[in-house]
């Protein structure tokens, strides 16, 4: 872990962790169903992400002692809170994407370079 970043920054910065949290939030609880619900994720990566999210206290792993073992994941209160924050980030991203660009916005203007007036 990068000492300059917090544990949640690692989660929010990881595409797969965010997708797993969203799927669990949406009611997908079992590992096989999660794998089918998240296009492109491998079993290995899913298991790694679930273990990390459980260690961080964002998801709760419940194993049922049945003849055919069953495991389910649910969000903890912290996981629910993080999902609400992720929803806010999604809304902000959509607003920024859909917002009209200001007149005079030129390539490079967002990097501290002034847009030069035309001839």
Image (cartoon, rainbow, N blue to C red):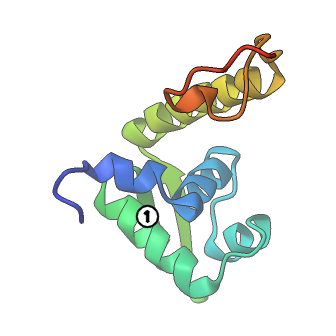
Compared to 36, does 20 lie above or below? above
Of 74 and 80, the residue lying toward us: 80
Of 16 and 79, the residue lying toward us: 16
Q: Quadrant of the C terminus?
A: top right
14 to the left or right of 29: left
Whole-percent x, y for residue 64 in the image: 49, 73
Q: Residue at horizontal 77%, vertical 28%?
A: 97
Q: Residue at horizontal 53%, vertical 32%?
A: 111
Q: Residue at horizontal 70%, vertical 74%?
A: 35
Whole-percent x, y for residue 67 in the image: 57, 89
Label 1: which residue?
Answer: 61
Q: Quadrant of the N terminus?
A: bottom left
Residue 72 falls in which quadrant of the image?
bottom right
Graded by Cα atoms within 10 Å as few (under 14), some (14 to 19) or many (20 or more), the crowding at tag 1 reads many
97 to the left or right of 10: right
Whole-percent x, y for residue 16 in the image: 58, 64
Of 116 and 61, the residue lying toward us: 116
Provide the secondary structure element on which disc 1 rests. Answer: strand
Q: Is residue 28 visible?
A: yes
Q: Residue furthest top?
A: 103
Residue 116 falls in which quadrant of the image?
top right
């Amino acid at each position: 872990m990068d000492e300059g970043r917090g544990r949640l920054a690692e989660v929010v910065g990881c595409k797969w962790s965010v997708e797993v949290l969203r799927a669990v939030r949406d009611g997908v609880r079992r590992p096989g169903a999660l794998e089918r619900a998240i296009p492109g994720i491998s079993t290995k990566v899913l298991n790694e992400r679930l273990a990390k999210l459980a260690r961080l206290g964002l998801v709760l792993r419940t194993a049922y002692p049945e003849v055919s073992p069953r495991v389910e994941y649910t969000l903890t209160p912290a996981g629910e809170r993080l999902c609400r924050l992720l929803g806010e980030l999604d809304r902000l991203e959509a607003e920024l994407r859909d917002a009209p660009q200001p007149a005079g916005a030129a390539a490079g203007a967002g990097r501290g370079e002034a847009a030069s007036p035309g001839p």
